[in-house]
């Protein structure tokens, strides 16, 4: 092979290698960005699951309260106390989520 052909092939290989290295760098940066986004989304999902769990507990408590006979004075006091507890728990959850 002639020197010119070897130089041409070497130049072509260097150019291709440079392109591959640039593409590799770009893909690594994209992977890092996607991993970070994945972590953020997992965190958001965990918060949402905790909120759903909290709401489910509130629904259960509300059902218990609604099942209590509302005719008696004791029942209304109990409902009031449970409502107060629910409000206090909501405040605590809100405070913890900040």
Image: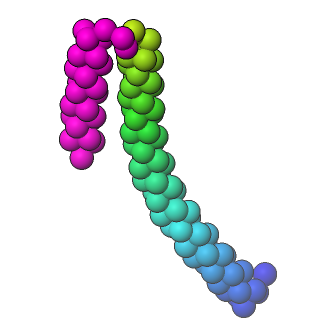
Residue 50, compared with residue 14, is above or below; it is: above
Q: Is 89 covered by the magenta stretch?
A: yes
Q: Main secondary structure of the magenta part?
A: helix
**In the image, is 83 to the left or to the right of 57?**
left
Residue 55, compared with residue 33, is above or below; it is: above
Residue 28 seen in the figure: no
**In the image, is 81 to the left or to the right of 20?**
left
Q: Which residues are magenta?
A: 70-98
**In the image, is 31 to the left or to the right of 90?**
right
Extreme residue in the right direction: 1
Q: Quadrant of residue 15?
A: bottom right
Residue 26, compared with residue 84, is above or below; it is: below
Residue 93, compared with residue 9, is above or below; it is: above
- At x 45% / y 32%, what residue is drawn? 52
Extreme residue in the bottom direction: 4
Count the labels in the image: 0
């Amino acid at each position: 092979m002639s020197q010119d052909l070897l130089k041409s092939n070497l130049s072509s290989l260097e150019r291709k290698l440079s392109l591959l290295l640039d593409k590799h760098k770009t893909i690594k940066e994209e992977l890092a960005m996607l991993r970070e986004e994945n972590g953020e989304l997992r965190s958001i999902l965990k918060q949402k699951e905790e909120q759903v769990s909290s709401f489910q507990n509130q629904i259960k408590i509300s059902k218990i309260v609604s099942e209590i006979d509302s005719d008696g004075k004791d029942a209304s006091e109990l409902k009031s106390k449970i409502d107060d507890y629910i409000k206090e728990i909501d405040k605590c959850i809100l405070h913890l989520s900040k």
